Image (cartoon, rainbow, N blue to C red):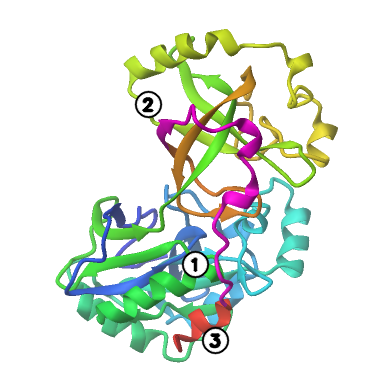
Amino acid sequence: MDLPVMPPVKPMLAKSVRAIPPGMQYEAKWDGFRAIVHRDGDEVVIGSRTGKPLTRYFPELVPAVLESLPPRCVIDGEIVLAHGGRLDFDRLSERIHPAESRVRTLAERTPASLVAFDVLALDDLSLLDTPQADRRTVLEAALAGAVPPVHLAPATTDREVARRWFDRYEGAGLDGIVAKPLDLSYRPDTRAMFKIKHERTADCVVAGYREHKSGPVVGSLLLGLYDDAGALQHVGVCASFPMKRRAELAEELAPLRTSAAEHPWGAWANAEAHEGARLPGAPSRWSGKKDMSWVPLRPERVCEVSYDHMEGDRFRHTTQFRRWRPDRTPSGCTYGQLEEVVRYDLSEVLSGTA
């Protein structure tokens, strides 16, 4: 492979802001695996956000790249997987599997797509120093003949259109909006763009915690919500506390410590128990040999957290602690309090007709 921008390349990143800034290019924020695709003739390398290769996990995308991308190019995009008309990150995550046979089976059963939203090089020309607006023009021309599962990400410079996308596209499983300054050069591994994500709050039961890697202080709080059958389901974690606060939390929560035998998630170490309920410490290809043990607490305290969106019956990302809610009872922390997002068909997002 001999391209003006060679792998591995770490992608340009975005920093969070609360409102959509004016005077920029706007795109949907895709919820998948960020990928830098290098193609030089018949050679294709798909790199992850960290620079590690993803090609073996998505074999169906190699012929798609050969069909839809220019013969010599470097493209920035997102690998996504659609199910039921919306993005499905859980099914996408299943593709990171050590067994090639399993990967091949999933590639046939639930094929992935590539959404392209930037170009870093074309033919013998590096575009890293080219302004964003000009790179978008090059990208549109380069992907004019692209066919599914390769898609050109819709983009606009109209802030009102971006606001509509922000409101509507969440129903298709998208994450928010990305804003790119029109004169921005491509800056690998730098938070030079802006992302605007949905934020909501929920009252959750604090049913345990994991200790911090530094010692016997709180690393993350384990959160639960009651389902319709009255079972407490593990829905995510709350983290990012200052070190002093981690120690204070360990002291505050000490009176609630209990044994696993008396806890509704006491069977968490039994792999079979995870088949019928959502418990902390579920086996995961992401956690590897990481210690997933935790400290059980009597589910008596309620906290309010902020979150962006749900993935099925759990929080998609780590939540942020807002405050304790002594005025709320644990039994009132149910899925019923969560905002239900109006569904939106992913095909309309990809077509850019919305």
Query: Within the magenta stretch, is there residue 137?
Result: no
Q: Nearer the viewer, residue 130 or 264?
A: 264
The magenta region covers 321-344
At x 50%, y 30%, the residue is 327
Q: Quadrant of the C terminus?
A: bottom left
Q: Which is nearer the N-term, disc 1 or disc 2?
A: 1
Q: Earlier in the sequence, mark 3 or mark 2?
A: 3
Position of 124 with respect to 154 (left or right) is left
- Which residue is tagged 1? 170
What percent of the width, then of the height, locates residue 71? 44, 80
Q: Residue at x 56, y 8 (%)?
A: 255
Q: Nearer the viewer, residue 176 or 214?
A: 176
**12 w.r.t. 287: above or below:** below
How many angstroms separate mark 1 from mark 2 (CA)? 28 Å
Secondary element type, mark 2:
loop
Question: In this figure, which residue is indicated by the disc labeled 2?
Answer: 241
Between disc 3 and disc 2, the foreground one is 2
Residue 307: give its label. Answer: none
Q: Is residue 196 above or below residue 296?
A: below
Quadrant assignment, res 289:
top right
Task: State the SS at label 3.
Answer: loop
* Residue 147 disc label: 3
Residue 287 image-quadrant placement = top right
